[in-house]
Image (cartoon, helix red, strand yellow):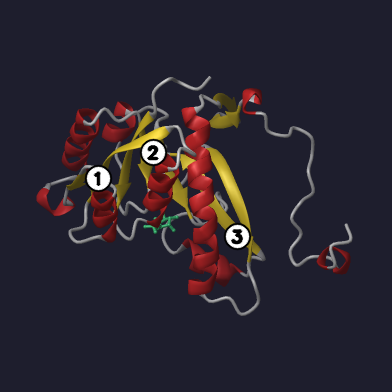
């Protein structure tokens, strides 16, 4: 189901842009049948802009300070994305709440990455929330964006154990490493046309099509902390 030409991505970021970098690298290496068509950032001097320029990708600074409302900002955002022929919008550390203006322009075509296993710990400081709650396992989620905060259909998740003695920084660093893998995989699934839609309990769901060739039978679960036997690799 792979389309002949690479899927055009618009990446929106506000900060470091390590997820952007993972996408850029995967596109460059041919691991992802996609192309970052534009990077848009709302914070002057953010590292993500530099990463885009280093990769010869158009980098646009669109400061929210120059707009009277979220809606007017998003009108401009949509215009820029459309101008660059974007087909899939990837929020990658974009510290803005997006409005229906963006979602209507790209229906089921906006992804976000969040540093927890949603629906646990939505919103800000997700890593701190997991630590404060005493969770043994956290992780990250790539989901489609809907009008709520971190409530949209989940596409892919990675589980990351919380270790005794973890600080917010150490746990965030391990989650970040998984984010990079997850985001590339999520975009790959969309690019391959492997996302199917269904509904459960009145809520939309993203399913991964059988054509993606994922194992359908049950696989071993992640138990954390592990049983002694697991630790010795005996299971
Ligand atoms: C990530 O932790 C992501 O989950 C969250 O913002 C952070 C962005 O990191 N939404 P980076 O800018 O991609 O390094």
Seen in the picture, residue 192 relative to 25 is either above or below; the reply is: above
| Residue drawn at (56%, 24%) of the image | 196
**Residue 146 location, x and y as percent?**
42, 37
In terms of image quadrants, where is residue 120?
bottom right
Q: Earlier in the sequence, mark 2 or mark 3?
A: 3
Helix, strand or loop for disc 3: strand
- Nearest to the observer: residue 84 or residue 4: 4
Task: Give the Cα separation between the discs numbered 3 and 1.
Answer: 35 Å
**Quarter of the rendering containing residue 159:** bottom right
Label 3 environment density (alpha carbons within 10 Å; few <14, some 14–19, many ≥20): many
Q: Which residue is mark 1?
A: 56
Residue 231 in the image: above or below residue 188: below
Q: Residue 97: in sight, yes or no?
A: no
The quarter in which the C terminus is drawn is bottom right
x, y percentage for residue 11?
32, 43
* Mark closest to the chain's N terminus, 3 or 1: 1
Q: Nearer the viewer, residue 101 or 90?
A: 90
> Relative to residue 52, is residue 75 depicted above or below?
above
Whole-percent x and y of residue 142?
A: 50, 44
Residue at mark 2: 147
The crowd level at tag 1 (other Cα within 10 Å; few <14, some 14-19, many 20+) is few
Q: Nearer the viewer, mark 2 or mark 3?
A: 3
Q: Earlier in the sequence, mark 2 or mark 1?
A: 1
User: Mark 3 or mark 1: which is in front?
Assistant: 1
The image's mark for residue 176 is none
Badge 2 element: loop
Residue 45 in the figure: left or right of residue 216: left
Q: Which residue is mark 3?
A: 138
For the residues bearing labels 2 and 3, Cβ distance under 8 angstroms = no
């Amino acid at each position: 189901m792979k389309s002949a030409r690479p899927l055009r991505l618009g990446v929106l970021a506000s900060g470091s842009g390590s997820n952007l970098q993972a996408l850029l690298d995967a596109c460059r290496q041919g691991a992802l049948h996609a192309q970052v068509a534009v990077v848009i950032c709302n914070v002057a001097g953010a590292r993500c802009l530099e990463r885009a320029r280093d990769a010869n990708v158009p980098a646009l600074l669109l400061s929210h300070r120059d707009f009277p409302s979220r809606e007017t900002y998003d009108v401009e955002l949509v215009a820029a994305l459309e101008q660059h022929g974007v087909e899939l919008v990837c929020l990658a550390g974009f510290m803005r709440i997006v409005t229906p203006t963006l979602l209507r322009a790209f229906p089921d075509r906006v992804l976000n990455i969040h540093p927890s296993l949603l629906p646990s710990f939505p919103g800000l400081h997700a890593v701190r929330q997991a630590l404060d709650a005493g969770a043994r396992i956290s992780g990250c989620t790539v989901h489609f964006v809907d009008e709520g905060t971190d409530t949209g259909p989940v596409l892919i998740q990675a589980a990351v154990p919380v270790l005794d003695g973890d600080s917010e920084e150490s746990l965030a660093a391990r989650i970040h490493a998984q984010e990079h893998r997850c985001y590339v995989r999520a975009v790959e699934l969309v690019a391959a046309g492997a996302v199917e839609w269904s509904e459960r309990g009145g809520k939309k769901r993203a399913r991964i099509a059988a054509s993606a060739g994922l194992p359908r039978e049950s696989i071993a679960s992640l138990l954390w902390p592990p049983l002694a036997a697991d630790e010795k690799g005996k299971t």
